[in-house]
């Protein structure tokens, strides 16, 4: 039976009222899973929209519409389509568009043919702008952030962009912009901009627990309208590895490492940032800092320095940064790093490179982190909200390059480039997230360890301990080396010597290139609990091999595929996560070192077969391959 819907041709005279409601109040829609799923037996066979060419150039609709051929035919989707059309015309300065919808439904075939005719209606422009600004925010700071001016064509996106810019003011509260006259179809639409203020200053305390940094505490004092302008001033102090010595390698400090990596790390910094006069999209900043930081089983860093920063918002969600950061720094517990990577193995050479040096890189970065723009409340807002959330995804991209040389005031010479990105797709039962990272370094000399790439651990490849993906250096005490049958002399280990994690300590070398990829699925198991399954991959590659002798050569690269599962508990402080991942790496040859008990020089004992999961195989080996990680926040 074929039926023409008698009410199918609907004259949307309420367009003006709906458009008025569209702009009464602005709110942000959170990117969270939707609970909406319509199930109907009729699907859309065809969709025709007339009237887009009434304006020159023709109106362009969103690439993905809420109702398209092949979709289920529902009232909710039809209304969402109507609203999308009206918004597209409003963006062209025609907020009073009228929409006629007719549908030819074939109930026998289960199909619907939809025809839409659009009358653009009268044009409108922005009228006078009234500011209602709460002290200490200045009217000049608000006017500098307006995305529209009196006399320009009326556009809802200009209002939404203005709200976004005003919310970027450090102490701006819930910004509201009220258009006046839309209900009456006014050709000139004045607006009232309401900007309340929040607290000017505050003390913030943060605390986290993780397997890589044990207990971490930090406190900040921030003034968000320093000296009566939108500049921010902050003082911060913090400590990491608290209780690492007393807890040892027990939960949750399982990846902190041995002494001296268990020592208390600390930082102190002071930062001032402010926008340029009459250019709120550009800011300059100065930071002074100092501290101690340990990277488990690699090095301990101590230093102080300053950073000068220029930040420019190139477009909404796209930020460029240029930075100069001279630092006076020194390393200790890094003798194997310098020996294994650069062939500096005797005591005098190591003492020289561990002395304080100037490190002064120049850095350029680009961050792309689009977010849903502030949305406006509309009739049937909950239906619109569900449509947006059902299709939404979030992502971010980062690209950076940095380098140092004599002209920058640096005693190190290198250039490095890296890129990273992540995307999360939300759906009704959970979400799927993916991340990738690439990087490479070029250099002709010794590099400080914080420049090289490392992989493995809580945020990267969870089948390995912190930084332990890639080529490794093995170290044994003189007594441990002799217990393995090795003489305390160069190449003193017998050929075919096999060792495991109980015999030696493994140290990462870092690398000149990195490749990382992650994918993770998260399923809601309750209102505040997610179950996760993931697959991580990491590869660290090297351009050089120690001192260049064949006996000393490290593998050119090392990688790891690591599957795993996890649990996320959503708390007011953020997600707390526990992950268990599998280390799939086989046994491999790595160089073994010890220290001369008389001179303190490092001795290369030879290449040995290292199997950290040894001791017989079977189920015991499987459990030794598992790595447990605890942390705050989603991994990406």
Image (tube, grey):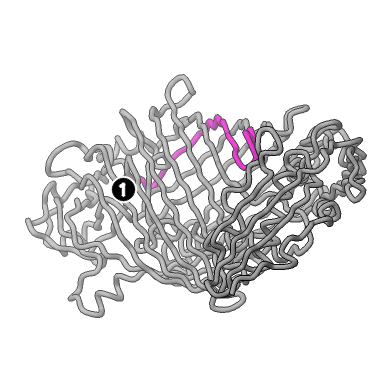
The residue identified by callout 1 is: 540
Identify the image quadrant of residue 258. Answer: bottom left
**Is 57 placed left or right of 297 in the picture?**
right
Q: In the image, residue 248 lies at what x, y percent?
A: 43, 68
Q: Position of residue 545 (x, y in %)?
A: 22, 40
Q: Residue at x 74, y 55 (%)?
A: 100
Q: Is residue 447 left or right of residue 192?
A: left
Q: Residue at x 83, y 54 (%)?
A: 25
Left or right of residue 628, residue 5 in this image: right
Count of labels in the image: 1
Say above or below: 428 vs 452. below
Q: Is residue 330 magenta?
A: yes
Q: Please tell me in which quadrant of the rendered image residue 144 appears.
A: top right
Q: Would you say 84 lies left or right of 346 here? A: right
40 and 260: which is toward the camera:
40
Could you say where residue 557 lies in the image, as x and y percent from the top left? 25, 47
Magenta segment, principal secondary structure?
Answer: strand
- Quadrant occupied by the N terminus: bottom right
The residue positioned farthest toward the top in the image shown: 407
- Residue 294: percent from left, percent from top: 46, 51
Residue at left offset 41%, top offset 70%: 628
Does dot 1 land on a helix, a strand or a loop? Answer: strand
For the record, the magenta segment spans: 312-334
Q: Tell which of 457 and 212 is nearer to you.
A: 457
Say whether residue 523 is visible.
yes
């Amino acid at each position: 039976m074929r039926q023409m819907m008698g009410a199918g041709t609907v004259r949307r005279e309420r367009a003006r009222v709906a458009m008025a409601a569209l702009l009464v109040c602005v709110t942000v829609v959170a990117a969270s899973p939707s609970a909406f799923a319509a199930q109907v037996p009729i699907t859309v066979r065809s969709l025709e929209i007339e009237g887009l060419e009434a304006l020159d150039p023709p109106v362009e609709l969103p690439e993905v519409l809420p109702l398209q051929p092949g979709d289920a035919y529902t009232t909710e989707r039809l209304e969402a389509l109507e609203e999308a059309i009206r918004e597209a015309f409003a963006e062209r300065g025609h907020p009073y568009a009228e929409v006629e919808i007719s549908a030819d439904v074939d109930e026998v075939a289960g199909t619907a043919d939809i025809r839409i005719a659009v009358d653009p209606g009268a044009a409108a422009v922005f009228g006078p702008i009234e500011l209602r600004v709460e002290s200490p925010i200045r009217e000049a700071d608000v006017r500098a952030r307006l995305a529209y001016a009196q006399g320009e064509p009326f556009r809802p996106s200009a209002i939404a962009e203005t709200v976004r810019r005003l919310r970027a003011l450090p102490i701006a509260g819930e910004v509201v912009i009220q258009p006046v006259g839309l209900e009456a179809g006014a050709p000139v639409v004045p607006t009232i901009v309401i900007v309340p203020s929040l607290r000017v200053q505050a003390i913030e305390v943060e605390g986290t627990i993780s397997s890589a940094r044990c207990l971490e505490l930090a406190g900040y004092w921030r003034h968000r309208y320093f000296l009566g302008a939108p500049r921010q001033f902050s003082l911060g102090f913090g400590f990491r590895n608290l209780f690492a010595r007393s807890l040892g390698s027990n939960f949750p400090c399982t990846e902190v490492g041995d002494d001296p990596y268990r020592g208390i790390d600390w930082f102190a910094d002071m930062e001032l940032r402010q926008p340029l006069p009459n250019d709120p999209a550009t800011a300059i900043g100065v930071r002074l800092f100092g501290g101690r930081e340990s990277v488990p089983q690699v090095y301990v860093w101590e230093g102080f320095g300053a950073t000068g920063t220029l930040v420019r918002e190139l477009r909404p969600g796209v930020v460029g940064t240029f930075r100069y950061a001279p630092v006076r720094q020194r390393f200790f517990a890094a003798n194997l790093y310098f020996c294994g990577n650069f062939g500096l193995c005797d005591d005098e050479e190591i003492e020289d490179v561990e002395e304080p040096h100037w490190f002064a890189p120049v850095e350029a970065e680009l961050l792309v982190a689009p977010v849903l723009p502030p949305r406006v409340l509309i009739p049937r807002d909950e239906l619109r909200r569900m449509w947006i959330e059902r299709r939404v995804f979030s992502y971010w991209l980062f690209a950076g390059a940095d380098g140092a040389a004599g002209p920058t005031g640096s005693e190190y010479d290198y250039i490095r480039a890296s890129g990273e990105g992540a995307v999360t797709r939300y759906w009704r039962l959970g979400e799927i997230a993916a991340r990738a990272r690439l990087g490479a370094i070029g250099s002709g000399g010794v590099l400080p360890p914080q420049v090289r790439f490392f992989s493995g651990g809580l945020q990267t490849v969870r089948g390995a301990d912190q930084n332990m993906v890639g080529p490794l250096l093995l170290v044994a005490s003189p007594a441990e080396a002799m217990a393995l049958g090795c003489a305390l002399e160069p190449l003193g280990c017998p050929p075919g010597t096999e060792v495991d994690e109980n015999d030696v300590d493994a140290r990462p070398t870092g690398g000149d290139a990195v490749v990382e990829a992650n994918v993770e699925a998260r399923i809601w198991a309750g209102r505040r609990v997610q179950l996760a399954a993931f697959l991580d991959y990491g590869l660290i590659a090297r351009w050089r091999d120690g001192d260049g002798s064949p006996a000393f050569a490290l593998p050119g690269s090392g990688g790891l595929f690591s599957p795993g599962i996890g649990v996320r508990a959503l708390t007011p402080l953020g997600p707390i996560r526990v992950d268990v991942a599998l280390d799939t790496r086989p046994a491999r040859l790595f160089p073994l070192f010890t220290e001369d008990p008389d001179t303190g020089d490092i001795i290369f004992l030879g290449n040995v077969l290292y199997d950290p999961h040894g001791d017989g195989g079977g189920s015991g080996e499987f459990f030794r391959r598992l790595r447990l990680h605890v942390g705050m926040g989603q991994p990406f």
